[in-house]
Amino acid sequence: NKGVRRVKQTRRDHLLSLGAFAAASAVPAVALAENHEPAVHVVEMLNAHPDNKRERQVFVPDILRAKVGATIRFVSTDRGHNSESVADMTPAGGAEWKGKIGDDVEFVVETAGAYGYKCTPHASVGMVGLLLVGYVPGNYEEIKGVRQRGKAKKRWEDIFERADELLASESS
């Protein structure tokens, strides 16, 4: 498969991710993994949110919940965007990726944890997103503390607020 990159998962990550995923209540702009794997999750890169045209330069969904082994596909629905992992917002041993402007990116995620991602040319205006894979508490609080600037700071605050609700609903 062109563009599919396998990343090594540690035994610990695998054991932690087993049974760690629970169905979550509906949270706006959150995609949930289904009960079967391998799942393919699509994240669109858009100039404007389909439900709120005033919200510009967005990933839809901006929070993605998946299981270890799922395929994540970033689709360049609108031109001029890419998807790139944020280096200091990736779990230890987790895959990093960087797509070219205008290209789709697809990879199989094999390490549990929280991953921050961005559109390189639009990160400063808040085109960012969060990927939550399997068991996430290991690095989730750590990435919440990463310093953000500009409009991305406000967007990250909103994303983390919704992710906190999602994770709380899973643990109850």
Image (cartoon, grey):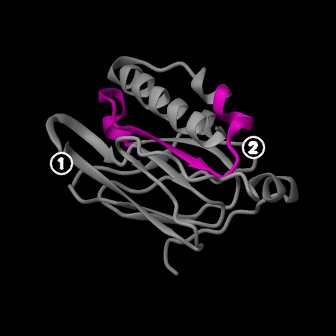
Residue 171 lies within the magenta run: no
SS at badge 1: loop
Q: Which mark is residue 13?
A: none
Span highlighted in magenta in the image: 119-141
Pick out the residue farthest to the front: 172
Residue 7 at x, y percent in the picture:
69, 63
Amino acid type for the residue under numbered disc 1: Pro
Alpha carbon separation for disc pair 1 and 2: 34 Å
Left or right relative to 19: residue 101: left
Quadrant in the picture for residue 38: bottom right
Residue sitting at 35 percent across and 41 percent down? 28
First reached walking from the N terminus: tag 1 or tag 2: 1
Near-viewer residue (155 or 2): 155
Pick out the residue farthest to the right: 11
Near-viewer residue (71 or 167): 167
Residue 67 at x, y percent in the picture:
62, 59
Residue sitting at 56 percent across and 53 percent down? 23
Label 1 CA crowd tier, 10 Å (few <14, some 14–19, many 20+): few
Which quadrant of the rendered structure holds the C terminus? top right
Residue placed under numbered mark 1 in the picture: 50
